Image: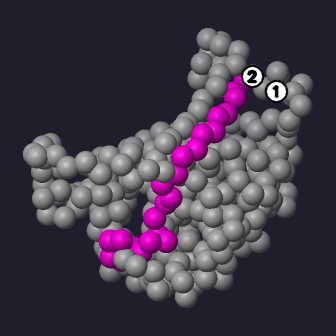
Amino acid sequence: MAVATGQCDVAVAWRSRKRGAASSRPWAGVSSRVGGNNQWTRPFGLLRPVDEIAMLTRRYCHDYGATRDHLANVALAARAHANNNPAAIMRDKPLTREQYLEARWISEPLCLFDNCLETDGACAVVITRSDRARDLANPPAYVHAWAQSIPRQHQTMTNFFCDDPLEGPAWACAAKLWDLAEIGPAEVDVAQLYDAFSPLILLSLEGYGFCARGEAGPFSDGDGLRVGGRLPTNTSGAGMSEAYLHGFNLITEAVRQVRGTSTNQVDGANWSLVTSGEGVPTGAMILRGEG
């Protein structure tokens, strides 16, 4: 917005994290008292984000028949993409469905491989006017549309106390995004969906309109999320297998896809969707290439 309104010619946005050490994670410390909304969840076992998302996952599986195989589809697609990405933490660590199903529980029904990584890392994006971008060394990625939103009744992460816990921020954000865009979900060539946990991908697929309510599990079957599938998703390995930078690396991969420089390049990719988290106040944008 600063560039678009003339407040600056060039802006740099960046994200860095130092979370490789367990002691750097916020839930590593123990507080003597719990206040605010946390007083209604923390004393009863919902200690970490994974515990909170596990509750929503149980509800989703109960209502729509999603299975661990559907969650595995998400994890395996991300890992397969990371195995082709030299910058990925999991570059040299293939993952099989058998390994996924045998993994230890973190918070049932979520196992080790349903969780994002905890990593050190950093990345940045440079934003400038389109007329300047055309003269630069790398092909530009144009911001076609963007939106931010949160639904009514929403409570961050513990969205259990509303009429429909599974209709999260993605639904509200998507309505605004597609209203502002000149395309719809069917025209999106590749998606980078925030993946702190594997079920968030299924919820986002439905929220952003790539499949109907309750159909994200079958949508992911048959390599549906891999390059060549129904919707190539998280093609760098993303938070689950490349690095977890609060989704910022999803933006850089979205740029690579519309430039044609991804290590898991989708042929003819000209429209790339990138989203922030499902379960928290969220945002999304559509990037367009020069095609």
Three-letter code, disc 2:
Arg
The part of the chain drawn in magenta is: 106-128
- Kindly identify which numbered label has been placed on residue 133: 1
- As drawn, is 72 to the left or to the right of 24? right
Residue in the image at 20% along x and 49% along y = 30
Per the image, label 2 sits on a secondary structure element best described as: loop
Three-letter code, disc 1:
Ala
Can residue 173 be seen here?
no
Relative to 183, say whether 51 is above or below: below
Task: Give coordinates of residue 250: x percent, y percent.
Answer: 62, 49
Task: Give coordinates of residue 31: x percent, y percent.
Answer: 16, 46
Residue in the image at 60% along x and 40% along y = 122
Q: Nearer the viewer, residue 10 or 118?
A: 118
Q: Nearer the viewer, residue 31 or 13?
A: 31
Relative to 122, say whether 279 is above or below: below
Q: CA distance from mark 1 to mark 2?
A: 6 Å
104 in magenta: no
Residue with the mark numbered 2: 129
Relative to 89, say whether 212 is above or below: below
Task: Give coordinates of residue 28: x percent, y percent.
Answer: 30, 51
Q: Are marks 1 and 2 in contact (CB under 8 Å)?
A: yes
Q: Nearer the viewer, residue 185 or 41?
A: 41
Q: Residues within 10 Å of mark 2 (few under 14, many from 20)?
A: some
Q: Which of the colour schemes (rainbow, by chain, secondary structure, one colour) is used? A: one colour
Quadrant of the image containing the N terminus: top right
Residue in the image at 43% along x and 54% along y = 278
